[in-house]
Image: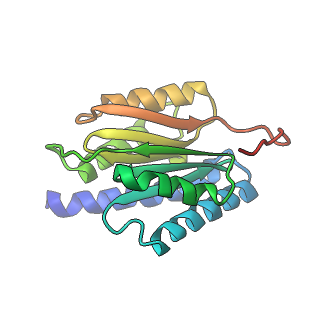
Amino acid sequence: MRKTLLPFLAFCLFIQGCAWGVIQDQRLMDTMASDKAMAASIKTDLLKDRFTDAFSISVYCFYDHVFLVGEVPPDARAKAIEIAKSYKPLSVTPHWFNKTTNERGDFMLATDLRAALIGAKGLSSTRIDTEVNSGRVVLLGVVKDEQEKRIAIDVARKVKGVVSVTSYLMLPQRPGAPISRI
């Protein structure tokens, strides 16, 4: 029973996060749409290039800043960055994992992490995306303030099986603030 119930619960948590995430996100709708479009275009180009045949890479974009996260061989990393930069984002931040294994599955750890973030007081976890690779956690997204950022990092560090936490959590940008391109 537990084996069939856990994937269902994880799916429910994911769907709940998606629905509330749009409502809770500090970005304007056009900014969110632009960010999603850029991330999707970069991912599409990586796939067209058959770039991800042998490894996994996720693409995120917040306020026109691109984040590439995944297990990518060293000789392919520059190509991924080049593809992302071709869309002229404000920045491209790669976070590469070296291949390793852990005793606990990433899916279960990701499920526990999501549940811990959802249950945390003072945190709107629906704005936080997570990547888990052999116990190494990456937090990405837009949080309302420094306190929310600290809560998310602290909660992630306390989840059993987490060996490291890297945060790319951003604060909301002010409307009308000047934007500089790289």
Q: Is residue 116 above or below residue 41?
A: above
Q: Residue furthest bottom?
A: 48
Is residue 71 in sight in this rendering?
no
Residue sitting at 65 percent across and 57 percent down?
A: 35
Determine whether, in the image, residue 39 is placed left or right of residue 4.
right
Give the left or right position of residue 99, taking residue 66 as reference.
left
Q: Position of residue 27 (x, y in %)?
A: 70, 48
Query: Looking at the image, how many numbered discs can be counted on the residues?
Result: 0
User: Residue 34 at x, y = what percent?
Assistant: 70, 60
- What residue sits 79% from the left and 42% below the top? 179
Which quadrant is home to the N terminus?
A: bottom left
Choose top left, top right, bottom left or bottom right for residue 114: top left
Identified at 53% across, 69% down, the residue is 45
Snapshot quadrant of residue 83: bottom right
Residue furthest to the front in view is: 75
Q: Nearer the viewer, residue 108 or 87?
A: 87
Q: Is residue 131 left or right of residue 61?
A: left
Q: Report the colour scheme.
A: rainbow
Residues 70 and 171: in front is 70
x%, y% of residue 25? 63, 48
Q: Is residue 113 above or below residue 151?
A: below
Where is residue 39? Give x, y as percent.
58, 60
| Residue 38 appears in the rendering | yes
Q: Quadrant of residue 148?
A: top right
Which quadrant would the C terminus be assigned to in this image? top right
Q: Which residue: 39% across, 30% down?
A: 155
